[in-house]
Image (cartoon, grey):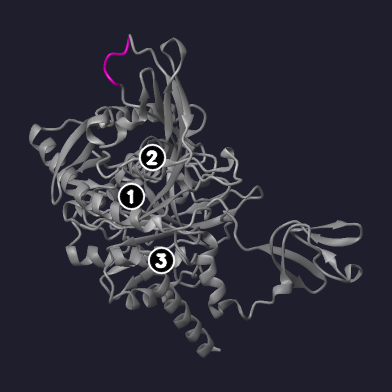
């Protein structure tokens, strides 16, 4: 993309990747260190910021919206999440003007596909459906603040982080005149002199342990690798974006299913190497899910308000 | 396989800097920001670069350190784009092939020029460059290729004129480039170093550090053409190269000046760690602190 390397540098890099020594000392399956913090934007219902290797920087915010839809025309329940990816021109000069629009649309479409079956995968997502004709719409807005390779991986982590941070108000649905319903926020009864409006609304959270992860697996030379740096991205032959979702049927016996496969950029792939790449994505996602669950648990204790923007 | 998700770091590199003792001997009153008065007796001094006069007072227009030369006061910035001085060794990337010259990116304000006349071409040192050579320019150096050159001249608008009229300069082949801020490069007599670990580094004054298996040697073939065969770098040499590169990144991240001594110190002290550990927060901050302390100690012993 923006970085250009000479042929000899590329050859050096490719030979290194094939010998499993990358230019920053990682092996092919290693991720750079990931920094994840939640609750960074006070104006949103849930937010998360993810940094990959101190450079790639993603900020995600979620806004809830009460949406009414026509239940007569919509027979099958639609997935409530809407993704929008925006590339800041600060991230890289290639995104200035309309430069990042197409890439942003491509990535948000991939997320839409990967999350299309999320009503079946995520255990309590169907709770966003409130009543006949009413549901919560979850708008996931992603902003890429800094670009240094493997954007989709970082975005998928940030989206899961933000979804786990998302607080959805509990509501009471009461039947109203003319077959309609009225939706009122649910507040616990405290009694005494406290007015109803001063009591905080009850909230619930989504169960994110089986949210799909999107990983880019790139083929450089004969090797497959995850989490490419910008230099490595110049040498990519072809790249697959693979969505993996963990399904927790019985504890300790998790299965992983592929929710989306999409090729990014050009290049041709043999069927055999596609299978290898999917296998690698599954292996990676096991470790990544584990690390993510650990981090989200550690984040719970943190007090809100320690934003990186401060 | 390693996957690690952490929270934001508790200690930032800047905090590290203020914790180390390297800042102790800096005279804080000499550090100014734009709009700050440079001296208290303006009548006795003349204003120099980076200053202007406001209400009879000499005021800084830059953020940096005040320097005094007899009666002349000037402000020198600490962090800035590479300015270039005659004789500097730079590592540059070709961005454009033009008529009779190459444009090179030296991370300066303007692209540098490398005229066709100032390169060493096959067939004798002082051969006149003719039209044929001009047609074959993109065969010698293509877009995106890295070269190592010396600054021959700085023009009045700041454009650098480069030359590679020596066997040690020229095209760079296999290796790793690391971009560091130019102010971290310590100027020294030698910028080409063959390290005792079986590899070499070129510390470009413009902030590009080149880590390579061996220093470039323009050996000309009998028929006068550059023939270069691609050779795979052996695994052990590659590992030391990657380690040196990681050490330079660590020095950069913690604002430790980069010269041969700091690189070898960092390399020796990084031995107990895995290469990929060097980019982790905890290890790197601890290691950087120790390296900074060691270098400071060496500096004091020299005094």
A114 on left or right of A154: left
Asked if residue A238 lies in the magenta stretch, the reply is: no
Q: Is residue A37 visible?
A: yes
B103 versus A296 height, above or below: above
The residue that mark 3 highlights is: B250
Whether residue B225 appears in this view of the structure is no
Task: Give the residue at the far left of this rendering.
Answer: A272
Q: Disc 2 versus disc 3: distance between alpha carbons?
A: 38 Å
Query: For the magenta stretch, what is the residue range?
Result: A73-77
Numbered circle sitting on residue B137: 2
Q: CA distance from mark 2 to mark 1?
A: 12 Å
As for residue A75 lying within the magenta part, the answer is: yes
| Foreground: disc 3 or disc 1 | 3
CB contact under 8 Å: marks 3 and 1: no
Q: Position of residue B196 (x, y in %)?
A: 29, 76
Q: Residues within 10 Å of mark 2 (few under 14, many from 20)?
A: some
Total numbered circles: 3
Taking depth in this image into account, of B11 and A147 the one nearest to the observer is B11
State the SS at label 2: helix
Mark 2 or 3: the one toward you: 3
Secondary element at tag 3: helix
* A265 or B286, nearer to the observer: B286
**The quarter of the displayed image where residue B169 is located:** bottom left
Q: Residue at x 30, y 50 (%)?
A: A9
In this rendering, the answer to whether B264 lies above or below A96 is below
**Most prominent secondary structure in the magenta stretch?**
loop
Q: Which residue is mark 1?
A: B122
Mark seen at residue B232: none
Q: Quadrant of residue B125?
A: bottom left
Looking at the rendering, in which quadrant would you find the N terminus of chain B?
bottom left
- Percent of width and height locating residue A144: 44, 40
């Amino acid at each position: 993309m923006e970085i250009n390397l000479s042929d000899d540098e590329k050859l050096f890099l490719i030979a290194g990747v094939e010998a499993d020594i990358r230019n920053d000392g990682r092996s092919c399956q290693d991720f750079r260190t990931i920094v994840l913090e939640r609750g960074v934007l006070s104006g949103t219902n849930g937010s998360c910021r993810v940094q990959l290797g101190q450079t790639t920087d993603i900020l995600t915010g979620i806004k809830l919206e009460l949406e009414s839809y026509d239940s007569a025309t919509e027979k099958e329940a639609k997935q409530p999440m809407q993704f929008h990816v925006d590339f800041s021109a600060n991230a890289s000069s290639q995104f200035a003007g309309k430069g990042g629009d197409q890439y942003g649309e491509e990535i948000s479409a991939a997320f839409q596909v990967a999350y299309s079956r999320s009503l079946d995968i995520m255990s309590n997502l169907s709770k966003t459906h409130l009543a006949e004709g009413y549901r919560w719409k979850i708008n996931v807005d992603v902003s890429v603040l800094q670009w240094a390779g493997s954007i989709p991986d970082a975005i998928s982590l940030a989206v899961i982080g933000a979804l786990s941070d998302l607080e959805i108000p509990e509501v009471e649905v009461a039947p109203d005149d003319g077959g309609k319903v009225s939706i009122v926020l649910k507040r616990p009864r405290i009694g005494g002199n406290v007015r109803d409006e001063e009591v905080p609304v009850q909230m619930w959270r989504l169960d994110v342990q089986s949210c799909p992860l999107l990983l880019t697996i790139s083929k450089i030379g004969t090797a497959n690798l995850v989490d490419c740096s910008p230099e490595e991205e110049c040498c990519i032959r072809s790249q697959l974006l693979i969505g993996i979702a963990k399904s927790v049927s019985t504890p300790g016996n998790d299965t992983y299913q592929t929710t989306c496969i999409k090729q990014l950029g050009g290049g041709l792939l043999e069927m055999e190497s596609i299978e290898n790449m999917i296998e690698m994505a599954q292996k990676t996602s096991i470790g990544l899910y584990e690390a993510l669950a650990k981090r989200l648990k550690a984040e719970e204790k943190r007090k809100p308000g320690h934003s990186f923007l401060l | 396989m390693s996957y690690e998700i952490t929270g934001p770091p508790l200690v930032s590199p800047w905090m590290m800097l203020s914790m180390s003792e390297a800042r102790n001997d800096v005279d804080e009153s000499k550090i100014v920001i734009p709009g700050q008065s440079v001296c208290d007796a303006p009548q006795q001094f003349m204003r120099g670069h980076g200053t202007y006069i406001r209400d009879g007072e000499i005021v800084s227009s830059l953020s940096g350190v005040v320097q005094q030369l007899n009666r002349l006061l000037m402000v020198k910035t600490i962090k800035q784009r590479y300015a270039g001085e005659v004789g500097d060794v730079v590592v540059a990337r070709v961005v454009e092939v033009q008529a009779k010259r190459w444009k090179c990116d030296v991370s300066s304000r303007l692209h540098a020029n490398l005229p066709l006349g100032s390169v060493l071409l096959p067939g004798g040192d002082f051969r006149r460059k003719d039209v044929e050579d001009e047609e074959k320019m993109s065969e010698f150096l293509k877009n995106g290729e890295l070269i190592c050159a010396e600054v021959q001249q700085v023009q009045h608008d700041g454009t650098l004129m480069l030359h590679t009229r020596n066997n040690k300069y020229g095209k760079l082949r296999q290796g790793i480039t690391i971009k560091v801020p130019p102010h971290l490069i310590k100027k020294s007599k030698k910028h080409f170093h063959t390290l005792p670990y079986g590899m070499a580094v070129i510390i470009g004054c413009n902030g590009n550090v080149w880590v390579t298996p061996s220093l470039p040697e323009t050996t000309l073939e009998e028929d006068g053409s550059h023939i270069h065969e691609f050779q795979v770098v052996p695994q052990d040499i590659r590992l030391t190269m990657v380690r040196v590169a990681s050490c330079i990144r660590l020095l950069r991240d913690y604002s430790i000046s980069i010269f041969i001594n700091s690189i070898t110190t960092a390399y020796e002290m990084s031995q107990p760690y895995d290469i990929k550990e060097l980019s982790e927060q905890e290890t790197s901050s601890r290691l950087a602190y120790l390296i900074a302390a060691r270098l400071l100690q060496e500096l004091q012993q020299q005094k």
